[in-house]
Image (tube, rainbow, N blue to C red):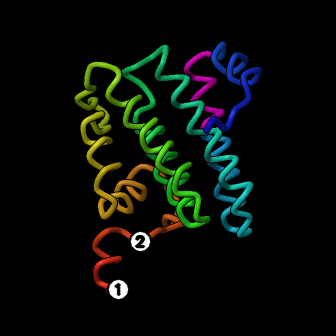
Amino acid sequence: MKFLCPRHRRMFARLSLNEQNELWLFWMEYAFTFCENQDTEKMIAATGSAFDLACLARADHPDCMHVELTLAAILVCRALHDRGDHTAADYVLFSALESLQSAEPCHGSPSGCCSTDECIEVLLDTPRQADFFSEYLNWPDIPASYPTPQTAMAAH
C-alpha cells in the first residue's frame, strides 16, 4: 500500500532533506487536526503520506528520519487496525521495519535522538509506543489504539 502516487513520490523525492522534514511535519499537523475532528480517513491519508515521505527520505539519507518514520508508522498502523484493515497495517509495519533495517544502524545523536535499533524495538513492542509517541511528538495522546497482545489476552 502506497499513500503517495508515483508522480508525487518523484516530486517529493527531489526535495531537500530539510524540505522533506518540513512537509512531514505539515502532514502530521494535518493528521492531528483530522484526528481531533474524528475524520479517520483523512487522518490515515495524511499520516500515510508522512510515512511514505519518511521512507523516501531514508532512501537517500539512511541515517535520517528514522524517528519520523517510526512515529508515522505507529499512528497509521493503529488507525488501519482500528478500521479493521489489518493487511494494510501489517504492510506499513513491514515496510517501516525494512526501511529501518536497510542501512547501518544509527546509534543516536548528540541531541538525544534514539537509534534505529530502538525504533525497531518500539515498532515491535506495542506497549512502548505510547511513551515513544509522547516523547517525540507533542500530541496529548496517541489518538488511535488497537488491542495489544496483552490486552487481547486479558479480555478473554
Q: Nearer the viewer, residue 56 or 108?
A: 56
- In this rendering, position of residue 121 left or right of residue 19: left
Q: Which residues are magenta?
A: 16-24
The verdict on residue 112 being magenta is no
Q: Residue at x 42, y 25 (%)?
A: 64
Q: Secondary structure at mark 1?
A: helix
The quarter of the picture where the C terminus appears is: bottom left
Q: Which quadrant: the N terminus? A: top right
What secondary structure characterizes most of the magenta part? helix
The residue indicated by pointer 1 is 155
Give the class, few, some or many, for how many residues have Cα within 10 Å of label 2's Cα (few <14, many ≥20): some
Q: Position of residue 4 (x, y in %)?
A: 69, 32
Q: From what the image shows, is residue 135 above or below residue 149?
A: above
Query: What residue sits right under mark 2 in the picture?
Result: 147
Residue 54 place in picture, x, y as percent: 53, 31
Q: Tell me which corner region of the image, top left, top right, bottom left or bottom right, holds residue 155.
A: bottom left
Q: Residue 118 vs residue 53: left or right?
A: left
Residue type, label 1:
Ala
- Please report the residue visible at 48 percent of the width from the left and 52 percent of the height from the top: 137
Q: Mark 2 or mark 1, which is nearer the start of the sequence? A: 2
Residue 73 in percent (x, y) is at 48, 46
Q: Residue at x 66, y 63 (%)?
A: 35
Residue 142 higher or lower than 29, as above or below: below
In this view, 45 is above or below 128: above
Whether the residues at callouts 1 and 2 have beta carbons within 8 Å, the answer is yes
Question: Does 156 appear above or below 153?
Answer: below
Q: Quadrant of residue 116?
A: top left
Image side of residue 21 versus residue 5, left or right: left
- Dot 1: within a 10 Å radius of its alpha carbon, few (fewer than 14), some, or many (20 or more) residues? few
